[in-house]
Every structure is written in C-alpha cells, then in structure tokens.
Amino acid sequence: GNSVTQMEGPVTLSEEAFLTINCTYTATGYPSLFWYVQYPGEGLQLLLKATKADDKGSNKGFEATYRKETTSFHLEKGSVQVSDSAVYFCALSDPTGNQFYFGTGTSLTVIP
Amino acid sequence: EAQVTQNPRYLITVTGKKLTVTCSQNMNHEYMSWYRQDPGLGLRQIYYSMNVEATDKGDVPEGYKVSRKEKRNFPLILESPSPNQTSLYFCASSLRGGPGTTSYEQYFGPGTRLTVT
C-alpha cells in the first residue's frame, strides 16, 4: 500500500538555522511527491512538488529532491525565518492522480 | 478571488443527528476531495470526485457520503455522526485529477471543526 512517514516534531530552530525535515514513502508504481505547509488556523498550501525520480522541487528557499533509491523526499532550507513557523506535511499521490496520502505533519517553530 | 469555501467553520452536534458540511470552489476545477485531520494521523482522504457525478472512496470513507451534482459544489454528509468523527475537515480542489495530472496543485479550504458529543 501507499504511506508516508515523516519526522516527528515539534522542531524548534533559531532564525537563520538550517532546516531538514525527513520524509520517506512507500508506494506502488511511481507516485508524485509534495510538501504542503499549514499556517495556524488555515488550510494547507502547496510548498513544492516533484513528479519523477531525481526531480528537485523548490520554492521560497525550500528544496526537496525525489530520491527513488532511498524512497525519500526530505525538505531543506538553508536559513529559516520566523515567518516559516508552521506545520509541514509530506504527501504523495498514487499513479491514478486521484488518491493522496499525507504524513502526520511536523510542527516547526523558529525563534528570533 | 479564487478560493475554496466551507460551511460551517465550526459545528457542535450530537450523536446521530444528520449533518452536511458544504464545500464550494470558484475556480472551475474538475477534481475535489475531502480530508479529515487528526492529531498524530495527519490528513486522511475520505472521498474524492473526478468530475460531476463521478465520486470514489478514499482511505477512510466509512460513515460519510458525498455527492457531486454541480461542478462547483461537493458536500460532505454525515447521516449518523458518532464521536469518532470529531475532527477537523478540509475540502480541496484541483484543476483535474486522473492519470498524468498529479502535477496539479490542490487548493484547500479553511477547514471545518466538527465536534460530535
């Protein structure tokens, strides 16, 4: 079956620190991979995506590379800001493009 | 403004009393989906719809019904709610679903917090 395993939080970092949030997946076929971000009291927003192996998704300084050999899609950012404080979800869609599977979410707090 | 709206945003009800949570999008999206978010479990997909009159089960469909009679609306129906359906519910839409369309972004509504006592 399909599933996503995400690093547990919460994560607390100082401003300008390096961020890594680990995500691994189990999937049949060739899924697409996503990172979504949820700010307090809001719905999820797409942060970045990758649709095939070795693709790198990037947005707002965040990056993640689709690694088929390690079934991973780790999220990284070189220098976090207070405004990056949110909950981050790793997700995959199955090859049908209709079914989506999310990780449990990782809460990030960035302190000045 | 392009958006997904959900109503109500907050709902407290009692076991067994039928309820409907509405979802509407103004982006002419074909694909819509419902999720529930629970602590420690992340988001789990309840039902999705590829287009009008085309719906299918997600991972956790038990106890829920949906319908898609118009492209813009995708209501979630709980015919006999139980306390284990207490959760935060999100509706989402995407331009299209189906093979070859996984690059399309899902747009999420603001959520509906449901409490069943």
Image: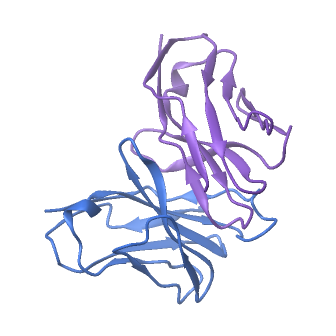
Residue B114 horizontal/vertical position (percent): 27, 61
Residue A89 in view here: no
Residue A87 lies, with reference to residue A18, above or below; the image says below
Q: Quadrant of residue A81?
A: top right
Question: Does the rendering let one see residue A12?
Answer: yes
Chain B drawn colour: blue
Q: Which chain is purple?
A: A
Q: Nearer the viewer, residue B87 or B8?
A: B87
Q: Total label count? A: 0
Choose between B34 and A72: the one closer to the eye: A72
Q: Nearer the viewer, residue A35 or A82?
A: A35
Question: Looking at this view, is A53 or B21 the one in front?
Answer: A53
Q: Quadrant of the C terminus of chain B?
A: bottom left
Q: Position of residue A84 (x, y in %)?
A: 55, 27
Q: Is residue A37 left or right of residue B29?
A: left
- Residue A18 left/right relative to A38: right
Q: Quadrant of the N terminus of chain B?
A: bottom right
Q: Residue at the far right: name it.
A: A54
Q: Residue B12 location, x and y as percent? A: 18, 63
Q: Residue at x 70, y 68 (%)?
A: B95
Report x, y in % for residue A51. 80, 50
Taking the spot 72% from the left edge, 26% from the top edge, the residue there is: A61
**In the image, is residue B106 above or below residue B23?**
above
Q: In screen coordinates, is A82 left or right of A65?
A: left
- Identify the residue shown where x is 60% and y is 18%: A80
Q: Residue at x 78, y 38 (%)?
A: A66
Q: How is the image coloured?
A: by chain
